[in-house]
Amino acid sequence: MVRFRGEQMKAFFRQWQLQSMVIPGIVWMVIFCYLPMFWLVIAFMDYSIAKPMLESPFVGLKHFEAFVSDDRFWRSIRNTLGMSSIKLILGFPIPILFALLLNEIRSLRFKRTVQTISYLPHFIAWTIFGGIALNWLGEGGVINQLMMAIGLQDREILFNSDAKYFWWITFFTDTLKETGWSAIIYIAAISGIDPGLYEAAELDGAGRWQRMWHITVQSIRPTIAILFILAVSGILGSNFEQIFMLKNNMNMKMAESLDLYIYNMGLVSGRHSFSTAVLFARSIVSLGLLFMANQTSKKLTGDSIF
Amino acid sequence: MKRNSVKRSLTLLLTAMLSLSLAACSGNSANNESAPTAAPPADATAAPQEEATLNPDEPAWKLDTSPIDLTWFVGANWYAHSWGESLTSKYVTEKTGVNVKLEVPSGEANEHITLMMTSGQLPDLISMGSWETAVKKLWEGDHVFALNELADQYDPYFYKVAGDGTLKWYRQENGNTYGVPNDSYSPNLMHETGMTAANQTFLVRKDLYEEMGSPDLSTPEGFLGALQLLKDKYPEYKGQPMSPFFAQGNVPYGMTEYLQNLLAVPHEKDGKVYDRVTDPEYLTWLKTFRTAYERGLINVDFLVDSDTQVEEKTNNARYFMMIREWTGMTAVNPLLAASANPDSYYIAVDGPQNSKGDSAKLFPGNMDGWMVTMISKSTKNPERAIRFLSYLASEEGQQDLFLGKEGETWETVDGKPQLKADMVNLIASDIETLEKQYGVLDTYWMMRNPVIVNQWRPEKAPVIKQMEDFANSQADIDSGIYKGLDPLGDSEVAVAWSRISQNWEEVLPELITAKDEAAFDKVFASFLERRDDYGFQQVVEFRQAGLDARKTKMAN
């Protein structure tokens, strides 16, 4: 923790204009992230939206029992973990590699163009991007035509109808859409590295690979660690919009993530208490994961969030 | 140095998080909505002096035509019309003083209205699909006015125009009626007019079907034969592969309820609600689809395609057979008939039938209608709202909204109101202008009463009429009573049913893609077992109780 000393306090008040800019953010967070926590109590009630909250009867752990005893809940846990693991293990390094490669490009104009193009898909909503992806995956789509042209397939495959492809479809579409955007934070971190370090290393005879490994990667290590810790704690989350767009009755076995389960079994029927109970349980596990990842990272690399 | 870099990355991270968290957090907080703030004010004491002048035979809206704004929520996210630009809406506003502000949900109507309920701020008028769970919540949660109470107080004329039958149909146990339906059809009316509002049809592409020699599709053999012929002779159309088969609404609708109707699977046997999924005729046909899939005659695209993909294939006439409502084809069919290949439009024919060769028993329109319209207790002007509703329900209001303004959009021919010829031409050529600029016909359907407006409806194009007539001829007029017997909402039985039906959605594709009949039987048997585990018995009892209650209601 940072301890405020007299001088720091003085500096703080001297910059009050700048410091006050954070207030809207704090207010927003209190209203939308902290106050709603109070309503977690409905997880223990039979809450009906048509009545005032306090009139709803307390039912204890009824809703928790309901989902723990549901085989579909466990299936959704498996799917969530499966998709998150692929994303974490294979997907996590991709933006880092992308940022490193981009950093090695000499031509500033080319670098900027590539960067802009790569993060543009991030701004397309999943409802649209998912629709485009579905067309690519369809019988007459790009992927089938490509595979048939290079002779890897002899007939069209409906990729989206086979559950075994689903995790990979989510992984590839997500990578395609988000790599450029996720790389921004690394690119920013890289740009903050003192150029003197590179100059000194070059004088000492370090080659490009050595500079990349010993200077760039080492300098952005804390950023990597923090993002990794957060990624681990988010392992029970999934991209609802993406999965909602790409799922169908035939790939549901592998597609129903925890979020989709909550939607299908909870929100669709208006079971708000049930949904809250599942979310509540998930938050507790996620918090545990966050602590675990943080401690591990602290032990191994010395970098941590808290 | 190290500490600095940690700080720097934290700053970077915070910036990134702030920019992202707006999207992320709001998604999660959807479950944690705030509790209702206050009960909506019930304004029941206003304007006692007017009561003296209320006459049950006189529309009360004429008493007060001062300008007023009423917000109207239409629970259909695809509804794209506005009020105030079209000729019709301007005319109605001028006449009654009521300016409507239409609101549509950005996503799911049910969720949208639920959110509004928690905030206690509802629009003045609400139209919602009669099957939506939120409708019941609005009624039970006392969020909307009892229309009979408002009518007693402000506009007894309402009883005269709203129709005793529909008011009775929606009367709750406490004696109140909270909503008026549109498109509500009583069996008597259907018998009388032959207009049944049935929209289920089995469609084939005319040119291919006729080139094949109009094969018999009503038996499994004929069905498979036609598919084989299609595969051998017409695998492609305009350079794209043909899709041999499509079923609207995917598993729960097209391949279940709808297909069962085509096979005339009964709803009831000896007074007991029949378990239609286990019907042997239905299973025979599911096995036929399995065989077709095994032989490569159909693909599973109809089970996985997104709406856009379906639309694209439809617009390019790439389907051969479709289990599809004709109402969804009214825009496409005339276009196909006017295309370079004018015979590539779709016609209704006899599709799959049971082994006895019975003709289909299609769902007709029913008493529930399509949407119900309610007046919320958030409104500051309940008296204007009820008067406006009774105006819209009356013959005058129906005529104003459906035909527009006399002399401009319609004229009297042989003593009967009739749309002008240029309007009728627009129906085929430019329906968008017709609805946007003039706002006649089905633009504002929230209070549409088919009994009244169908007499003014212009004759439909032949390519549409063929499908409609086919559906009408096969409608099972008295089956409206069986529609929507399944439990909805968050009760235990509703949850059981939702688990069963969601499971069925996954099981049916497995049945069709099963490698042989033995595998099919095994998958189906395990579904039946799971269904019992999930509490199917409760659902059966619920359906039975619902049906019995409806029968008593109809008898009274």
Image (cartoon, coloured by chain):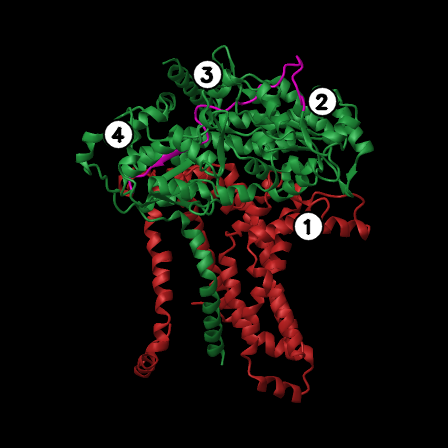
Chain colours: A red, B green
Please indicate whether residue B411 sits to the left or right of residue B335 in the image: left
Instruction: Name the spot of residue A161 as percent of width and height, x first.
Output: 66, 41
User: Residue at label 4?
Assistant: B149
Q: Quadrant of the C terminus of chain B?
A: top left
Q: Earlier in the sequence, mark 2 or mark 3?
A: 3
The residue under the point 78% across, 39% down is B236
Q: Looking at numbered disc 3 in the image, what kind of residue is underneath it?
A: Asn
Q: Give neighbour class at mark 4: few <14, some 14-19, many 20+ (Cα, 10 Å).
A: some
Query: Element type at marker 4?
Result: helix
- Mark 1 vs mark 4, CA separation in Å: 57 Å
Return the mark for residue B217: 2
- Both labels 3 and 4 in a single chain: yes
Along the line of sight, the residue nearer the viewer: B203 or A111: B203
Q: Does residue B400 show up?
A: yes
Q: Which residue is mark 1?
A: A136
Check the image and name the residue furthest to the bottom.
Answer: A203
Discs 1, 2 touching: Cβ within 8 Å: no
Instruction: Name which residue type carries label 2.
Output: Leu
The answer to whether one can see residue A58 in this image is no
- The residues colored magenta run B349-378
In x, y percent, where is residue A304? 47, 68
For the point 25% across and 28% down, which residue is it? Answer: B152
Residue A203, image quadrant? bottom right
In which quadrant of the rendered view does residue A42 lie? top left
Q: Position of residue B27 (x, y in %)?
A: 45, 52
Q: Quadrant of residue B474?
A: top right
**Mark 1 surroundings: few (<14), some (14-19) or many (≥20) residues within 10 A:** some
Which residue is found at the position 49% from the left and 78% from the top?
B2
